[in-house]
Amino acid sequence: MRRAPRDTEATSRSVTRRALFMGGCMAAMVGALGARMRFIGVEQADEFRLLAEENRVSIRLIPPARGLIQDRNGKLIAGNEQNYRVVITRENAGKTDDEVKEVLNRLSHIIPMTAEDIADAMKELNPKVNSAFVPITVAERLDWDDFSKVAINAPALPGVTPEAGLSRLYPRDFDFAHIVGYVGPVSEKDLQDLRDKQQETGENIDPLLMIPKFQIGKIGVEKWMEDTLRGTAGTKRIEVNHVGRVMRELDRQEGLKGKDLRLTIDADVQNFVQARLGEESAACVVMDVNNGDIIAAVSSPSFDPNLFVRGISSADYSALTEHDHRPLANKVVQGAYPPGSTFKMVTALAALEAGVIDENTVVRCPGHIEMGGIRFNCWKRGGHGPVNLKRGLSESCDVFFYDIGQRVGIDKMAETGKKLGIGVRHDLPMSAISEGKMPNKAWKLERYKQEWVIGDTINASIGQGYVLATPLQLAVMASRIASGKQIAPRIIHSVNDIAVPIPAVEGLGLDGSKLRAVQMGMFEVMNGPHGTGRGSRIADDSMRMCGKSGTAQVRNFSDAEKRSGATKNENLPWKLRDHALFVGFAPAEAPRYAVSVVVEHGGGGSLVAGPIARDALLRALTGGMPPLTAYPADQRPRVENLLNTLQLRLPDGTQPAPSKV
């Protein structure tokens, strides 16, 4: 049957469209293949030619820039500096140890390297220690000339790569060593701790930490804020030829810089206090009584943390560890001392709160008390006569506190002491924070399997015996007495300029009138006609301070030694002298800052620690060098000479011009 012309025409058009569609698809495929072939054959010809010549592509981690640490005003405390270094990769340096060692020997003729340096590098390059593809740092902190020599001689040094990186720098060196700490290479112990943590939490170990000689925080803020400061690694693809020479960097993906921290510390106050303590074995804390900000936390003597970053020598390390003033110890939080008479406010508040005394209760002081055949002396041999609370604090009458301590008992004293921060571990990003010791009956029974006796209470009532407190705890105590609130110390102000919230502060749960009675006693200590701290008073009425000095014995003396005068500090070796302590706050009417000072084996608290505390408070209150008008007139010539000879230092190491106070 013959098809109609119309059907034939329709069929023809349909076939034509299909042919065109199929042809177009085939043309597109051919075009795509051609374009791909051109891209591979022309545009990527160099890359594939190099690969054909036994070139290889390696992926390496890029350590991120570590976060900066600044003071409360943005002044740099810990930063990063340019560091020219040389790394070597085992897989590119040679197949055998002899080949690798030969490369290192060649390198030693170009830059300074000792036989010991080469031996250390070979240990790190051992495949049993580190993977063959991991770059090992063999030299760092090179000057530009040595760095250039390595780059020029790269063709003869397979596997060796000169790199420009960053290294930690502490421009204010001694001032912040104990607070900020320092960084150092990841140790085997660090890795083991991380493996243990991984088993407990399932959290993966940051691959950055597997890079040999990668530096992490070792102590202080650097350690405890490590995860915040470290940042995230970047990556780079590099091309090496058949002899291990790096040909080029193919691409790079930068990591994330670590977060910046801003501390509550004021760098200028910190530097002033550090200079004021001089070479004493001592500690001083200045704290904001309203929010707990630590304005200064100084442990003396200090050390240069840059030595640890760069690799401290055996001689320098021995000098630090063998020094009798213990420069490596952070006495602010690690040193636990008998608080001596600075503890008397705890005894007073405990007795007032328990209702066993009021501010008008009188105790007669004949110069001593007898208890169980043991004589407990007052510091004033002839006695103080009739003493009430205000006089007991202002003249620091021991017998008054022996008496009220027995009335209230150790358990109530311990309860009040903990309310004020004694025997409490305060949570700060610092290393080896001590809990101190605030004993009670149960504590002694558990610790020594002995019953608490009345003599223990008498000793504790004046801050001796088992009671121990750190300078930080004493500053917290002074802050809480000044504010009547549970002020907690803090040292991190903000992270990446985002302020760290300050928790709501609750009251201490102490009666306000009883707290004021103790505050008034501390005021009389400094400003009363017979106050033991009067010599360290602030003469400016707008900044008058409240305080309490303390002198803590480090050993017991026999009656014969006391009668002979052998107990006088000037007659004793340094390590047998009393500790000097002081706590206080100012201004008396509207407290802003609290202070604590401990001078190891310094002697009398009012003579040694009190003047330091006054100067530290004035520096914080005035925002500059303490003005002479704040001192009693007869002390001004001596104070002026002292202030103008302090070894204050700027970050660049220069000495500022003397202040015209």
Image (cartoon, helix red, strand yellow):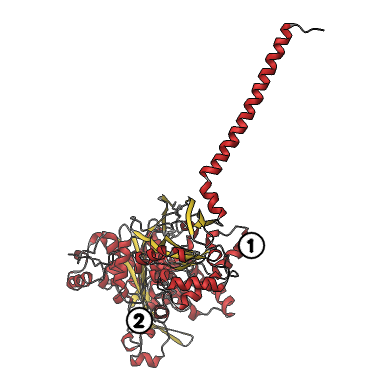
Disc 2 versus disc 1: distance between alpha carbons? 58 Å
Q: Residues within 10 Å of mark 1 (few under 14, many from 20)?
A: few
Which of the 4 quarters of the picture holds residue 347? bottom left
- x, y percent for residue 42: 52, 43
Q: Amino acid at mark 2?
A: Trp
Does 153 sit left or right of 521 as displayed? right
Which of the 4 quarters of the picture holds residue 84? bottom left
Tell me if label 2 and label 1 are in contact, CB under 8 Å.
Answer: no
Which image quarter is the C terminus in? bottom left
Instruction: Kindly tell me whether residue 458 is visible in this rendering.
Output: no
Q: Residues within 10 Å of mark 2 (few under 14, many from 20)?
A: some
Q: Residue furthest right?
A: 1
- x, y percent for residue 458: 45, 78
Residue 379, label in figure: 2
Q: Disc 1 on helix, strand or loop?
A: helix
Residue 199, label in figure: 1
Q: Of 427 and 105, which appears nearest the observer?
A: 105
Q: Residue at x 26, y 61 (%)?
A: 543
Instruction: Kindly tell me whether residue 224 is visible in this rendering.
Output: yes
Q: Amino acid at mark 1?
A: Gln
Q: Disc 2 on helix, strand or loop?
A: loop
Does 309 sit left or right of 130 as displayed? left
565 shown above or below 140: below
- For the image, the number of numbered tags is 2
Q: Of 256 and 97, which appears nearest the observer?
A: 97
Which image quarter is the N terminus in? top right
Please name which of the two marks, 2 or 1, marks the residue nearer to the observer. 1
Q: Of 215 and 544, which appears nearest the observer?
A: 215
